Image (cartoon, rainbow, N blue to C red):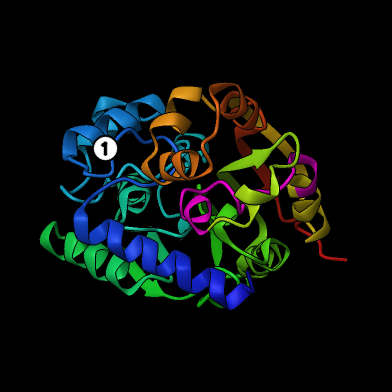
Amino acid sequence: MRKEEIRKVVRKGYARIVKQDSSCCVHVSSCCGSNDLAKNISKKIGYTENEINAVPEGANLGLGCGNPVALASLKEGDIVLDLGSGAGFDCFLAANKVGKNGRVIGVDMTPEMIEKARENAKKNNYGNVEFRLGEIENLPAADNSVDIIISNCVINLSPDKKRVFKETYRVLKPGGRLMISDIVLLKELPDFIKNSIQAYIGCLSGAIRRDEYIEAIKTAGFQKVRIIEESSFPIEFMANDPTTKALIEDQNLLEEKVKEIASSVVSIKVYGVKPNKIR
């Protein structure tokens, strides 16, 4: 698929998700969705009960693959930017940490997500959070303007990941840092998955090799790049994810083939720093 076609497909898929309040990304067991389902998913990928209960109702759609806020070491007064902020889950968690003197900016390319996030912020009086419509390949933020960038299972959806990391580097202040949760591959996926619209919305076919992902971050200029945590992709998540399940049924895949595909996918948390002195 061409880049613009991919963006259109992803935007449409996630607009449908927010309208249904359902969960259709990686760690999913039902696309019919509920608050309880989103909470259960969030617990499995690293959020505490207190964190889940600390955000506005409807902000957690269960779309992540990790908890980048927990590892970002946010402090009072920080300016944070969230790539692919969805309905605002991680933004609201970050806002609670940076306080009134800090600020959190969420960027998402899906108008329905932005509308939902702004509604959540307004209802719950989050004056230190704003949501901007835009693509993560062309961030609506000034050069050297934020302290920390977080992202949760979103960059894998971008058709131009190198551009995303270059933009991330541009908007971070010197000394600013990156904390990302995302899906990467240990080996290449079969062509029928890489070319599948269903698998793209389900966060699979857009994923790239782990080494390629890390190299793209380093090439953008980041230093001290390292994987802080890595976990396998549980087979039950893949078998029950509605977008992936439809693909499995369409291709008549045997259980062994599904296991083989699942073994190719891991969730990682990556850290990087923009150097204080730019060469």
Q: Is residue 225 left or right of residue 233?
A: right
User: Is 239 or 10 nearer to us in this picture?
Assistant: 239
User: Is 207 or 115 nearer to us in this picture?
Assistant: 207
Of all residues, the one furthest to the front in this rendering is: 252
Q: Residue at x 20, y 55 (%)?
A: 20
Residue type at mark 1 is Ala
| Quadrant of res 230 | top right
| Magenta range | 197-212
Measured along the vertical axis of the image, is residue 112 above or below residue 263? below
Residue 209: say if magenta: yes
**SS at circle 1:** helix
Q: Position of residue 116 (x, y in %)?
A: 22, 64
Q: Which residue is mark 1?
A: 38
Measured along the vertical axis of the image, is residue 34 above or below residue 136? above
Q: Is residue 124 left or right of residue 207?
A: left
Q: Is residue 227 left or right of residue 93?
A: right
